[in-house]
Amino acid sequence: MSRRFARSRLEALNDGIFAFAMTLLVLGIRLPPDLPITDPRELAAQILGLWPQALTYGISFAVLAVMWHSAIEHRQREEAITSGHVRLWMLYLLFITSMPFSSSVVGHYGEMAPAVWLYAANMLMLGLLGLLLNAYNYDRTQTYEMAAARRRMLLFMGSAVLSALIALFAPRYALWAYALNILRLFSAPPPQRRRAGPG
């Protein structure tokens, strides 16, 4: 018989790890500590030169926000979950916690294809595991919601693949492929379920 675990404990861990990973992302935006800057204009130029790291931070923060929102959007009401669900969620959180590293690499070396591929691989694993978690996060009556979540994940994974392909010939512009995920904002809202009237 499969062991069951308190869902509230896993959700608390999930929220904490997402918050910590989001906070770590900003540490990738920093000026070298040994810069001999004496001119305000030079400082301004150095700050403006951080835009690749800032762009990566913005994209990565948005990705984490979307993933967190998807994880909590339709949480099941059951208080207990299976050990298989726990293991899958732990693997998912493993790739969540690796995002600050892959974001830092692509933020500093985004003009090189291997950095983009590392980031894309991280995104693909999150998308794949997100698809698998959908089977746990929706019940059988939520067919529309589950299909919509699947489309969002496939769009996300598609943008990662596109980014990796663009990196073959123009790594500097590869991260813009993730802008495709803006399309999820225009997805149709779920249909309102009718309440049964008095008999």
Image: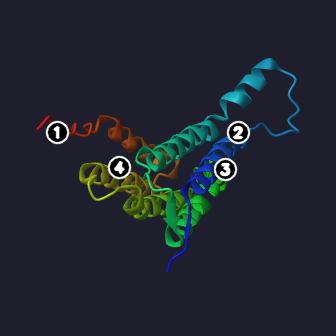
The C terminus, quarter of image:
top left
* Mark 3 lies on residue: 104
Q: CA distance from mark 4 to mark 1?
A: 31 Å
Pinpoint residue 114: horizontal percent, then vertical percent. Answer: 57, 62
Q: Nearer the viewer, residue 16 or 140?
A: 140
> Tag 3 or tag 2, which sits nearer the N-term?
2
Pinpoint residue 110: horizontal percent, then vertical percent. Answer: 59, 50
Q: CA distance from mark 1 to mark 2?
A: 54 Å
Q: Secondary structure at mark 3?
A: helix
User: Where is 130 relative to 21, above or below?
Assistant: below
Taking the view exactly as shown, the residue that stands out farthest to the bottom is 1
> Tag 3 or tag 4, which sits nearer the N-term?
3
> Tag 2 or tag 1, which sits nearer the N-term?
2
User: Where is 177 relative to 122, above or below?
Assistant: above
Figure disc tally: 4
Please state which amino acid type lies under the numbered disc 2: Ile
Label drawn at residue 152? 4
Label drawn at residue 150? none
Mark 4 or 2: in front is: 4
Q: Residues within 10 Å of mark 3 (few under 14, many from 20)?
A: many
* Mark 1 lies on residue: 196
> Tag 2 or tag 4, which sits nearer the N-term?
2
Labels 4 & 1 near each other (Cβ < 8 A): no
| Residue 6 position by quadrant | bottom right
* Mark 2 lies on residue: 29
User: Where is 6 relative to 106, above or below?
Assistant: below
